[in-house]
Image: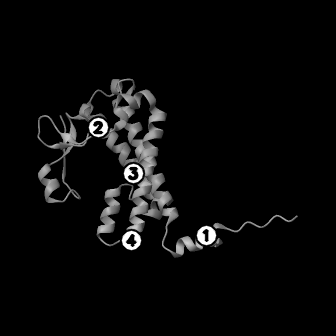
Amino acid sequence: MAIPALIPLEESDFYVDWKRYGYHLEEYLSEFGGTLFSIFCVVGAVAWMFSSSSPIPQAIHSHALRLFLTGLMLGGAGGIVAISPPGRLSGAHIHPAATLGFWALGKMHFRNAAGYIVSQMLGGVCGAFLGHLAFGQMANQVQNAFMIPAIAPSSGMISCLPESLYSPSIFATERGMRENNLLSASATVFLD
């Protein structure tokens, strides 16, 4: 009995139909993977830099310096996603706000934007879960890098950082968020 020859994916009826009707599985998977990697890096960087059981806070006493280094690490992770082949394939939106911006500008069809957003949300959940598994106790000590926007105690501005990081943190002003419809709120960095 002869074994049937395998057809390359690009020549399969499923793939041809999928591409003909505008579905972009590769791009959706790229967004999923890029978002998973980015969120995993966020959990890991915050856990290493701010957990009481991490050696980093004992080695680097300056809270502002650890925030700066965390930003550099996460910027590097974002850059890696953007220049990687999957990132170049999908455009490395990595965040639903970027995708919604492209859709609002008419650069994406609604069904593709929806596919990107679903992929990003699933990638974010999986990245947070894997970060929790990988960094365990350290991730728990920093609430798995989970952030709840709140009014910062002394400034009256909206903060997007965990309460433990309020002192030197990144704030977006309420007025800026109103004036720019939450899409391009200006951020200001306040350091001790």
Rendered position, 170 above or below 11 = above
Q: Are marks 4 and 1 in contact (CB under 8 Å)?
A: no
**Residue corresponding to mark 2:** 67
Q: Give how far across and how far down residue 49 sits, in percent.
A: 35, 32
Taking the view exactly as shown, the residue that stands out farthest to the right is: 1
Label 2 is placed on what type of residue? Leu
Q: Are marks 4 and 2 in contact (CB under 8 Å)?
A: no
Is residue 84 at least partly visible in the picture?
no
**Residue corresponding to mark 4:** 109
| Point 37% across, 35% down: residue | 144
Q: Give how far across and how far down residue 128 sits, in percent.
A: 42, 41
Q: Earlier in the sequence, mark 3 or mark 2?
A: 2
Of residue 19 and residue 91, the one placed in the foreground of this image is 19
| Point 47% across, 60% down: residue | 28
**Residue corresponding to mark 1:** 14
Residue 159 appears in which quarter of the rendering? top left
Residue 92 appears in which quarter of the rendering? bottom left
**Residue 115 appears left or right of 164:** right
